[in-house]
Amino acid sequence: MGITQSLARAAKPVVGTLNCLAPVLDLGIRLWVANVFWKSGLTKIASWDSTVTLFTHEYQVPLLSPEAAASLATGSELVFPVLLVLGLGARLSAAALFVFNIVAVISYPELNEVGVKDHVYWGILLLVTLLHGPGKFSLDHLIGRRWLGKS
């Protein structure tokens, strides 16, 4: 037996364990990112007058009135995280939050370096779900298996 075969045999249980942990990581990513956006949405809705004031004077959202931008932002932060947690339309939700995340950075030019890094981090995590899918612990996976015959 060659060295390549020996290495492959030794790596097999490690790879198997890592493959079993992948769905847990997928779920963890979805929960983490959803929590960030959900809390932001709750903050906006808890003090609606302050939210509209921020969208009027601080945030520079293009093409929308401050009221429309505040409503769209709050709705996005309260709907898409729930779908992300459930793993229902998870790629669509991740894409929507990814775009929302970019707009948030662009529309608030006063964002400091730490804030930008946070948004980059969230964007990368959203890309994992967008490109890889929500994983086995999701309604998307269940629907795919049950009604679409996917494994």
Image (cartoon, grey):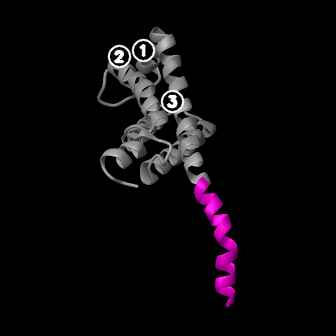
Between disc 3 and disc 2, the foreground one is 3
Name the residue type under label 1: Val
Q: Dot 1, how many residues are within 10 Å of its Cα: few (below 14), some (14-19), or many (20+)?
A: many
Task: Please report the residue visible at 46 percent of the width from the left and 46 percent of the height from the top.
Answer: 134
In front of the other: 21 or 73:
21
Name the residue type under label 3: Phe
Q: Which mark is residue 134?
A: none
Q: Is residue 34 above or below residue 45?
A: below
Q: Which residue is mark 3?
A: 37
Q: Is residue 110 visible?
A: no
Q: Position of residue 119 (x, y in %)?
A: 54, 40
Name the residue type under label 2: Glu
Task: Please report the residue visible at 35 percent of the width from the left and 16 percent of the height from the top.
Answer: 67
Q: Which mark is residue 52?
A: 1
Q: Alpha carbon of mark 3 to alpha carbon of mark 2: how far?
A: 19 Å
Do tag 3 and tag 1 residues touch (Cβ < 8 Å)? no
Q: Position of residue 44 (x, y in %)?
A: 49, 17
Q: Dot 2, how many residues are within 10 Å of its Cα: few (below 14), some (14-19), or many (20+)?
A: some
Of pointers 3 and 2, the one earlier in the residue sequence: 3
For the stretch drawn in magenta, the main secondary structure is helix
Of pointers 2 and 1, the one earlier in the residue sequence: 1
Q: Which span of residues is magenta-colored?
A: 1-20
Query: Does 118 sit left or right of 144 as displayed?
Result: right
Q: Is residue 134 magenta?
A: no
SS at mark 2?
A: helix
Q: Is residue 14 magenta?
A: yes
Q: Is residue 69 visible?
A: yes
Of pointers 3 and 1, the one earlier in the residue sequence: 3
Between disc 3 and disc 1, the foreground one is 3
Q: Alpha carbon of mark 3 to alpha carbon of mark 1: how far?
A: 18 Å
